Structures are given as structure tokens and as C-alpha cells.
Image: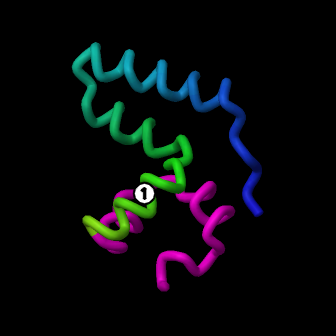
Amino acid sequence: MPETMSLDEKLAISNRACALWHAGDKEGFHRLIRTAPMPPYLAKIYKEKVGVEPLIKGGWNLSEAEAEFGPDWLSR
């Protein structure tokens, strides 16, 4: 099981990503924000509304969703 990211680590990523956004680096923002785990409830909604393929291709960190729903949750 992947190591859990602390709230402080998540906030640090969010703050750095926001700084990139405000500096006009939208690509850097999107790349960095995906390194923080997507909350399980959002991952579930994303899967239902957008589909599995964009979740996989988007490079999202789904470690918390996998921990909550199981490693095969995307294929169910």
C-alpha cells in the first residue's frame, strides 16, 4: 500500500500549485496538483461522470481512492 501523504504535504503541494497558477504557469499547476492524492469521493464521482480512461491518462494520484475502494475499483 502506498504511503499516506500528510495534510501538511498536501497543503504544501496546493500552495506551490497555486503560486504556479498565479504566475501564469497553468501547465505546471496541472502537473503538480495531480501529485496530491485525489480525495476518494471526487475520484468516484470523476469515474462515474467522466470515465475511467481520463482518470488513468490524466496521471492523477489515486492512492487514497485505491486504499478506500480497493486496488481494482477502477475496473469495477
Left or right of residue 26: residue 17: right
Identity, as a three-letter code, of the amino acid under mark 1: Gly
Left or right of residue 1: residue 34: left
Image x and y of residue 16, in percent: 47, 21
At horizontal 71% and vertical 34% (from top left) the residue drawn is: 6
> Does the magenta segment cover residue 54?
yes
Q: Residues within 10 Å of mark 1 (few under 14, many from 20)?
A: few
> Does the magenta segment cover residue 72?
yes
At horizontal 35% and vertical 58% (from top left) the residue drawn is: 58
Under circle 1, the secondary element is loop
Residue carrying label 1: 59
Q: Could you tell me what secondary structure mostly forms the magenta stretch? A: helix
Q: Which residues are magenta?
A: 51-76
At horizontal 53% and vertical 55% (from top left) the residue drawn is: 40
At horizontal 55% and vertical 47% (from top left) the residue drawn is: 37
Q: Is residue 57 above or below residue 37?
A: below
Image x and y of residue 4, in percent: 73, 46
Q: Quadrant of residue 47?
A: bottom left
Q: Is residue 16 above or below residue 52?
A: above
Here the colouring is rainbow
Q: Is residue 8 above or below residue 4?
A: above
Image x and y of residue 19, in percent: 38, 16
